[in-house]
Image (tube, rainbow, N blue to C red):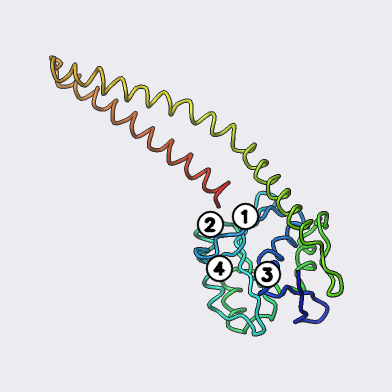
Amino acid sequence: MNYKTITKGVSMPDPHQGYSFEEVVARELESYGYEVELTPKSRDFGADIIARKDGKKMAIQVKYTSRPVGVHAVQEVLGGKKYYRCKDAWIISTAGFTRQARELAKRSKVHLIEWSSLPDYIESKGHITRNYYRRTSPTKKPNSSRSHATWGISSSRHLTNRLSRIAPIIAIAVIPLIFGLLLDVLYIRRILPSILHYPPHSSSQTFLILLMFIGVNAGIYFLIKFLVDLIRKELIL
C-alpha cells in the first residue's frame, strides 16, 4: 500500500493505489472490535461503511479530502442512517468540517470525527482497546498479501457470527411457514375443487373456509417478509 501524509502525524492511503480510504477506515474500526461491512460503491445510499458493536449499528460516511466537509455530507449520511436502519451516523473526514456542517450535525445528532482523532474518539466511548491491527506509520508499509488475508478471515468470522445468531430465529420461523404452504397446497388441490363441485349448504361455511385461506396466506406473507427483513438487516446490510 502506498501512502502520503496530508495531515500531521497521520498516514493516509493514496486513492489511486492499494487500498481505498474506505477500506483503511474499515480496518481501523475492526482493530477496535467493530464488525464492519463496505457498502456497494455505486449505490451506497449515503453510507460507505456499516459498523456494528455492542448491539449498535452505525452508518459511516468517509471523506478523503483536502477541504472541510460541508453540509451535504451530513444530509447524505442521515439518509444512509435511515436506509440501513442504523442507531447512529458518523462522518470521518481528513480535513475537518465547515461551520454549517457542524451546526446541522449538532441538531441531527450526527457524529463528526476527524481522521487524526478517530482513536481518541473511539477510546472516549469507554472500555475499547485495539486488538487486531496497528495504524500504519508513514515509513512502514504493511505486507499487502497478509493484509488481504487477515481482512478476509476477519470478515468471514463476522459473517459466521451473524449467521449463528439468526439461524435459530430462521429455523423457528420456517416451521410455521412450511405448515402454511402445505395448507395452501391442500386448499388449492382438495378443498377448492370440492367447494366448486359441491358447494356448502350454508354461506357461513363458505365464508369460514375463505377466511381461513386468507388468514393462512396473510401469515405466510408476514413470515416471508420477516425472514427477508432479518436476512437483509443482518447479512446484506
Observer-side mark, 4 or 3, equals 3
Q: Classify 95 as above or below 215.
A: below
Which mark is first along the chain, 3 or 1? 3
> Residue 149's mark?
none
> Residue 77's mark?
4
User: Could you tell me the amino acid type at mark 2?
Assistant: Tyr
> Residue 57's mark?
1
Q: Are marks 3 and 2 in contact (CB under 8 Å)?
A: no
User: Could you tell me the amino acid type at mark 4?
Assistant: Val
> What number of labels is visible?
4
Q: Position of residue 130 (x, y in %)?
A: 82, 57
Q: Position of residue 13 (x, y in %)?
A: 73, 73
Which mark is first along the chain, 2 or 3? 3
In whole angstroms, how far apart are the C-alphas of marks 1 and 3?
20 Å
Q: Position of residue 231 (x, y in %)?
A: 53, 43
As helix, strand or loop, the secondary structure at mark 3 comes to helix
